[in-house]
């Protein structure tokens, strides 16, 4: 990965890495919690707002929260060229990333179904988590009930493209790099960043599959040294889900929202698990020069 703290004195590097990493994590956690709201929201209120307007607001907020803040931090605090995060990516790497992302989605569907089945009891946390999950489900269904092709394309930009760029820039590009310096261990940094990436989305019935996605993106970035690779993986994961919804609503494919939340058949999970493992080894050897 890029040495994003190269402009800082070596004797203060570790302490500054902790400060930068924790500071960015605190920032994004506070923003996400404020955005999720602390009180119960009437779902009928959500349904009464135009979905295109909601998408537009979400897109503007995400651009500022992830992309703009990260770019400002890179320019003012780190003082390194923004372009350093995006060296040229070979087409072979992009193709390999595409196949890895698709095969991993099949495997992760089993993790997602298991996570959704977890019982947190009758605690206040469980009630809050269930309430948040229900609100998010209503919001997601509302903004992805496509009324036109332009509505679908706007969703691609807001739900797939902006998060792929912004979230990877913040979490993998900045926070993961800083934790590498702080922990002195790439693997610890990748897993800690993956956990933070999952937790701040405030979806505790989907925290495990999202954490594993974050870890996958983290290793793709670490091995390749190119943040664009992680962005491509993120884009594929979010974009394919939207495309499947759109095709289902157009009756081009037969799949319901409930089926999309279900695990793939176990034989498929095992087969694609083996494929993912093999392709990750290929990807690692492509860039590993030890």
Image: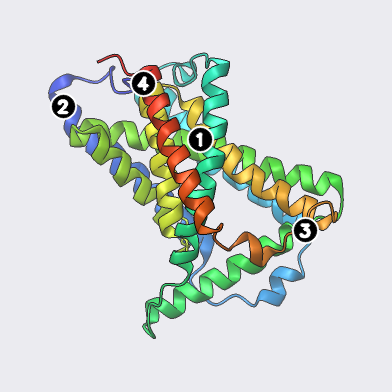
Mark 1–mark 3 distance (CA, rounded to whole Å): 25 Å
Q: Are marks 4 and 1 in contact (CB under 8 Å)?
A: no
Q: Position of residue 278 (x, y in %)?
A: 42, 33
Q: Pointer 2: what residue?
A: 12
Badge number at residue 285:
4
Of pointers 4 and 2, the one earlier in the residue sequence? 2
Measured as percent of width and height from the top left, residue 106 is found at: 54, 49
Q: Secondary structure at mark 3?
A: loop
Residue at the extreme front = 267
Q: Is residue 67 visible?
A: no
Tell me the distance, in whole angstroms, between the alpha carbons under discs 2 and 1.
Answer: 38 Å
Q: Secondary structure at mark 1?
A: helix
Q: CA distance from mark 3 to mark 4?
A: 39 Å
Instruction: State the scheme by which the image is colored.
Output: rainbow
Note whether 21 is above or below 76 in the view shown: below
Q: Residues within 10 Å of mark 2 (few under 14, many from 20)?
A: few
Residue at 47% across, 38% down: 275
Is 34 on the left or on the right of 250, as rendered? left
Crowd rating for badge 3 (residues with CA inside 10 Å; few <14, some 14–19, many 20+): few
Can residue 47 be seen in this snapshot?
yes
Q: Position of residue 195 (x, y in %)?
A: 35, 51
Q: Quadrant of the C terminus?
A: top left
Distance between the Cα atoms at labels 4 and 1?
A: 14 Å
Which is more N-terminal, label 1 or label 4? 1
Task: Give how far apart the Cα atoms at labels 4 and 2 are.
Answer: 34 Å
Could you tell me which residue is drawn at 27 percent across and 39 percent down?
189
Residue at label 3? Answer: 254
Image point (69%, 49%), residue name: 242
Q: Mark 4 against mark 2, which lies toward the viewer?
A: 4
């Amino acid at each position: 990965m890029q040495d994003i703290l190269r402009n800082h004195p070596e004797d203060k590097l570790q302490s500054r890495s902790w400060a930068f990493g924790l500071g960015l994590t605190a920032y994004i956690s506070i923003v996400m919690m404020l955005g999720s709201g602390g009180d119960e929201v009437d779902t009928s209120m959500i349904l009464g707002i135009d979905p295109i307007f909601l998408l537009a607001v979400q897109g503007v907020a995400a651009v500022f929260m992830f992309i703009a803040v990260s770019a400002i931090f890179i320019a003012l605090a780190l003082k390194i060229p923004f372009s350093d995060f995006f060296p040229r990516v070979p087409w072979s790497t992009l193709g390999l990333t595409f196949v890895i992302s698709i095969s991993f989605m099949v495997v992760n569907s089993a993790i997602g179904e298991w996570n959704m089945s977890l019982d947190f009891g009758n605690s206040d946390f469980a009630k809050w988590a269930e309430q948040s999950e229900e609100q998010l489900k209503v919001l997601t269904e509302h903004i992805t009930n496509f009324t036109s092709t332009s509505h679908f394309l706007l969703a691609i930009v807001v739900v797939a493209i902006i998060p792929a760029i912004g979230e990877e820039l913040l979490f993998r590009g900045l926070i993961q790099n800083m934790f590498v310096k702080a922990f002195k261990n790439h693997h610890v940094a990748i897993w800690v960043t993956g956990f933070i990436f999952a937790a701040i989305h405030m979806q505790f019935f989907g925290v495990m599959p999202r954490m594993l996605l974050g870890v996958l993106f983290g290793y793709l970035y670490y091995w390749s040294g190119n943040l664009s690779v992680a962005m491509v993986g993120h884009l594929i994961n979010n974009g394919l889900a939207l495309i499947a919804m759109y095709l289902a609503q157009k009756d081009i494919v037969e799949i319901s929202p409930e089926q999309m939340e279900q695990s793939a058949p176990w034989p498929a999970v095992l087969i694609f698990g083996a494929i993912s493992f093999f392709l990750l080894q290929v990807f690692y050897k492509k860039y590993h020069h030890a």
